[in-house]
Image (cartoon, coloured by chain):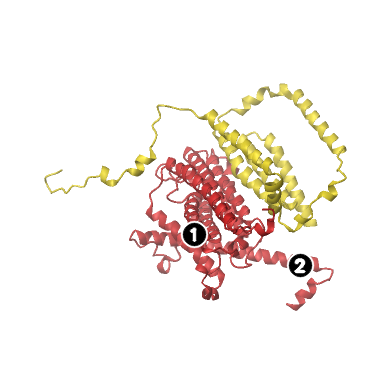
Amino acid sequence: MIVQAFAFYLFAGILILSALMVVSARNPVHSVLFLILAFFNASGLFVMLGAEFLAMILIIVYVGAVAVLFLFVVMMLDVDFASLRKGCMRYVPLGIILGGVLLFELVTLYTYWRTAPGVKFATPTAVNDLTNTEALGMILYTDYVFAFQMAGLILLVAMIGAIVLTLRSRPNVRKQNMLDQHKRQASDVLEIKRVTPRTGV
Amino acid sequence: MAPVSTIIDGSAESWLVQAAIWLAWTTGFSLLVIIGILLCVAYMTYAERKVLAGMQRRQGPMTVGPFGLLQPFADGLKMLSKETIIPSQAHRIIFLLAPIMLFSLSLIAWVVIPFDKGWVLANINVGVLFLLAISSMGVYGVIMAGWASNSRYAFLGGLRAASQMISYKASMGLIIVCILLVTGSLNLQEIVLAPRPIWVQILLLPMLGVFLVCILAECNRAPFDLPEGESELAGGFMVEYSSMSYALFFLGEYANMLLMSAITTILFLGGWLPPFGISFLGFVPGIIWFVLKIMAIMFFFFWTRATLPRFRYDQLMRLGWKVFLPFTMGWVVLTAGLLMSFNALPGQIVGGGL
């Protein structure tokens, strides 16, 4: 138990610290790197909860794909963030109001938290001897298959939308035609000649 | 053995003793694995130079020690004695963190690799996902190195490496899905031991070919070594590194190659089992088969390096996204369909809802 408590406070502490650093770091690249650290520690917490599948998916999807793209964009941007920050003190009252509303909502949610009386009996008992990967799969692909497919469709639409928005047809660009390159044989472009000495080709 | 077991049963200190035994066992095994991998890495560099030399009718390293066998250690010592140079404009912490991260990640993944039946540090249920997760973290070592060096060559190399690794990770994931459809488990030991009928093995054969190309791209090896690209980028993301930090990149690269070979062995070649299911070869210890299979794939790495010229970058991206991704995606559907129609899906007994 001591080890578990220690691990929990370690993960949670680093998670909160790195989340703070994400918003307070001066260099945006450092922010993204702290964000990655935060993801990593969150997945550590998932492992401690026994949700190892979620933990690994969190790392594969968010750390392995999403954050890499963040890092790409942030590294390529050449924005002077100091000058952007100059006027931001004007928005402090607005920020405080928004933060206050969110805090209020969280507190009310926490204080009025009730568990429905039927939930205790509704937990599936048959799932206990399955690993959580199998359990997730059985629920996701049977009871919630339409919601799952719908989520996939929404992502597909978002992806196509992004492609449509950024695709430009530029007529003047010269492109390689792969088929031509593959069809090219050595005999088409090379001619081997036997050259006799002192005469030339 | 008897006193140890009596201590474990019942007495008040049993918890502490058990923890101590567990700690000692884990530490010892980890040390053994790390030292073994580092030795393998050292001699893989030697093997690579010898193989390349043989294919190019040269001698290779031959002066240090008998047959040049001490060459890796001579190289290592030379690296250690060099001066560590940090560019004045570099982001110092990230610059130093990048090689450490790359190297340690390439060692961390070995905890889930089963060397023989039961010879594994952490026999976890989601072993395959753990491997994918750790190898997807490896991109950061490269990007951080490229960015922190504050040099254009290094930055270009880092960007190339990152986009290349992400592109091929997609098809690698789909190939692994094919394997999981056949085996029905994410645990690496169960994947090795799962029965595979001969038609399933033939079905998976094209995937083995695609996977071998993917691991070449994933390890930034020739013919996909564009991130280093010494002809145009002067060494890519490691151009600013010297001495020990460079050595860590080098060790990390070779440890990653070994890891990818181990993953291929486990997913496709039957891990520690004797080849082709020949039962009378079972007297040979499993770890020897495992190492032999890894060495065969390492030889494939060296062979392609000696044979193929470097790809162009647009060819690399086209191969990843327009050839491999649709092909593997179609193959997942094909595998699933065939397994379903022949009632060979491993989960059909468990699920029951089909």
* Between discs 1 and 2, the one toward the N terminus: 2
- Viewer can see residue B179: no
Q: Quadrant of the C terminus of chain A?
A: top left
Separation of marks 1 and 2 at Cα, in angstroms: 47 Å
Residue A176, numbered circle:
none
- Which residue, as the protein is rendered here, is positioned at the far front? B341
Residue at figure coordinates x 67%, y 58% from the top left? B125
The image position of residue B265, as x and y in percent, is: 53, 61
- Towards the viewer: B114 or B346: B346
Give, as a three-letter code, the residue at label 2: Gln
Chain label for disc 1: B
Q: Is residue B4 left or right of residue B289?
A: right
Chain that is yellow in the image: A
Chain that is red in the image: B
Look at mark 1 in the image and give the residue it sits on.
Answer: B202
Reply above or below: A183 against B207.
above
Look at mark 2 in the image and give the residue it sits on.
Answer: B18
- Snapshot quadrant of residue B344: bottom right
- Which residue, as the protein is rendered here, is positioned at the far bottom? B2
- Towards the viewer: B273 or B14: B273
Chain label for disc 2: B
Give, as a three-letter code, the residue at label 1: Ile
